[in-house]
Image (cartoon, helix red, strand yellow):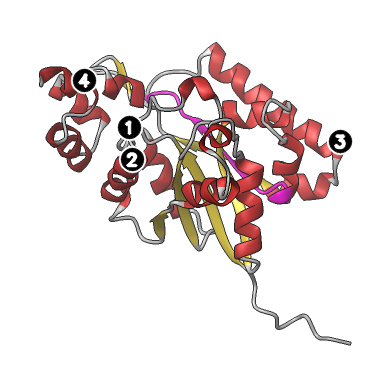
């Protein structure tokens, strides 16, 4: 009988998908990825900007994919064991290979397709999804394309991150409601599959608030896209990403041409 005791363990890779339009600083994407990279459970955190949006109505409205890749590379360059991946582009191009342009326009490449490609390409890697609380709730409640396949492909390995309230403030009713909804979703999964598996595979973690009280602005990509106020933007974006946006006249700066 083969001795499995000394088989090398699989590499543990955390997958963090984002639009990165643009990627935000310490109160947003940078804070999330820094936190994920600090968790001893992963050998690598892989940042994966969206290539083609699942909803046709939103396609073509994002900044070019290469620009979003380059902004992510600037933002995450100093965090050990973090890489920026073009896996979504590669997956889309594999699925669309040989199709006519009119057919390509209707292609919907989702997380299940991406995970299938990654698992086939890297059989010695154990993948975990990093999801915000609301996104996790939507996944468990079947609002994703092929939701059940996504859960099974990662063997229910998910890091769910929730926002902490600002220092000195109590949790809002919305935060408490969200926390209860996350717990309910985990309980729902435990009824559907081995409760031992889901209780050990799903990790709920907390990261700092994404609201900058002193400027009254949420640290979000949409807020960054809609202003040229550099006092605000310096709170939302890293210096490198802000310089990139300004030099290329992106977002609200395009109106200054």
Instruction: Answer yes or no: is residue 220 visible.
Output: no
Q: CA distance from mark 2 to mark 1?
A: 7 Å
Q: Which residue lies under the disc numbered 4?
A: 252
N-terminal-most mark, 3 or 2: 2
Instruction: Tell whether label 4 touches label 3 (CB within 8 Å).
Output: no
Q: CA distance from mark 3 to mark 2?
A: 40 Å
Which quadrant is the C terminus positioned in?
Answer: top left
Q: Residue at x 73, y 26 (%)?
A: 141
- Residue 191: numbered disc: 3
Q: Which mark is in front, 3 or 4?
A: 4
Q: CA distance from mark 2 to mark 4?
A: 16 Å
- Label 4 Cα neighbours within 10 Å, binned few <14 / some 14-19 / many ≥20: some
Q: Position of residue 53 (x, y in %)?
A: 50, 31
Q: Which residue lies under the disc numbered 1?
A: 63
| Foreground residue among 44 and 228 | 228
Q: Residue at x 72, y 35 (%)?
A: 147
Q: Which residue lies under the disc numbered 2?
A: 68
Instruction: Tell whether label 1 touches label 2 (CB within 8 Å).
Output: yes
N-terminal-most mark, 2 or 4: 2
């Amino acid at each position: 009988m083969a001795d499995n005791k000394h088989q090398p363990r699989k590499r543990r890779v955390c997958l963090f998908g984002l639009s990165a339009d643009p990627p935000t600083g310490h109160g947003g994407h940078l804070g999330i990825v820094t936190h994920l990279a600090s968790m001893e459970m992963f050998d690598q955190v892989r940042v994966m900007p969206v290539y083609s949006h699942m909803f046709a109505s939103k396609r073509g409205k994002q900044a070019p994919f290469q620009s979003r890749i380059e902004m992510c590379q600037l933002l995450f360059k100093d965090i050990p064991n973090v890489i920026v991946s073009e896996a979504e582009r590669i997956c889309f191009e594999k699925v669309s290979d040989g199709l006519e342009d009119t057919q390509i326009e209707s292609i919907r490449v989702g997380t299940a397709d991406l995970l299938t490609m990654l698992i086939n390409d890297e059989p010695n890697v154990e993948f975990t999804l990093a999801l915000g609380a609301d996104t996790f709730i939507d996944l468990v409640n079947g609002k994703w394309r092929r939701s059940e396949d996504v859960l099974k492909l990662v063997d229910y390995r998910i890091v769910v991150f929730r926002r902490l309230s600002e220092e000195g403030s109590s949790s809002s009713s919305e935060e408490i409601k969200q926390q209860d909804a996350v717990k309910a979703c985990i309980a729902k999964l435990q009824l559907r599959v081995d409760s031992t598996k889901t209780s050990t595979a799903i990790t709920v973690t907390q990261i700092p608030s994404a609201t900058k009280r002193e400027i009254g602005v949420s640290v979000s990509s949409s807020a960054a896209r809609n202003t040229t106020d550099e006092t605000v933007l310096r709170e939302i974006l890293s210096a490198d990403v802000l310089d990139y946006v300004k030099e290329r006249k992106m977002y609200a700066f395009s109106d200054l041409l």
